[in-house]
Image: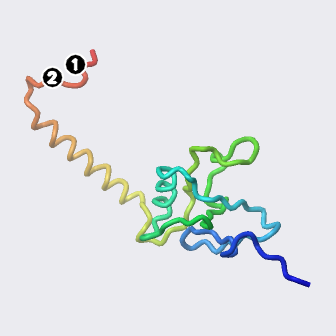
Amino acid sequence: MEKARSKYPSGGFCAVWGCSNRQTKGDGRKYHRFPRDPTKRKQWAAALKREGFVATEYSRICSDHFTKESYNGSGRLNCSAVPTIFNFPDHLRLTVNKLRICVMHAVVQWITFYSSVPSNHVTLAAMLA
């Protein structure tokens, strides 16, 4: 008897770093193809934080990496869904301290820029009033 061939040549494994999920019958997961839209495809690839990764027609991301809000009532991914649940190594994680430093840096840049604007300069708030 001939063995049935999988319709996923690579075995249907998840493309996320550190995820060992493979597509098998009855595992309860969905395996999503990367979007065809180039902008959305880049968003998904960027979310993976895998340097040099290029999604192919066989690349999949399992449902473990999407929030419940990513799905509509019929169990399909929303068109705006992007994978957000990951278990990255420490050097790829955006920790609270790193986030705090990024925000403080942005505030300092903003204050520095606006403190150099002449006082007679029309502000955005004045233009909108």
Q: Residue at x 72, y 59 (%)?
A: 30
Task: Name the disc covering residue 122, or none.
Answer: 2
Q: How far across and how far down the image is residue 111, in percent?
A: 19, 40
Q: Residue furthest bottom?
A: 1
Quadrant of the rendering where the N terminus is positioned: bottom right
- Depth check: give the residue in front, 49 or 101: 49
Disc 1 + disc 2, Cβ < 8 Å: yes
User: Does residue 128 appear left or right of residue 42 in this picture?
Assistant: left
Quadrant of the rendering where the C terminus is positioned: top left
Q: Callout 1: helix, strand or loop? A: helix
User: Does residue 129 appear left or right of residue 3 in this picture?
Assistant: left
Kindly indicate the quadrant of the structure image that contains residue 58: bottom right
Q: Residue furthest top?
A: 129
Kindly indicate the quadrant of the structure image that contains residue 59: bottom right
- Kind of residue at disc 1: Ala
Task: Name the disc covering residue 126, or none.
Answer: 1
Q: Residue at x 66, y 48 (%)?
A: 77
Density class for disc 1 (Cα within 10 Å; few <14, some 14-19, many ≥20) is: few
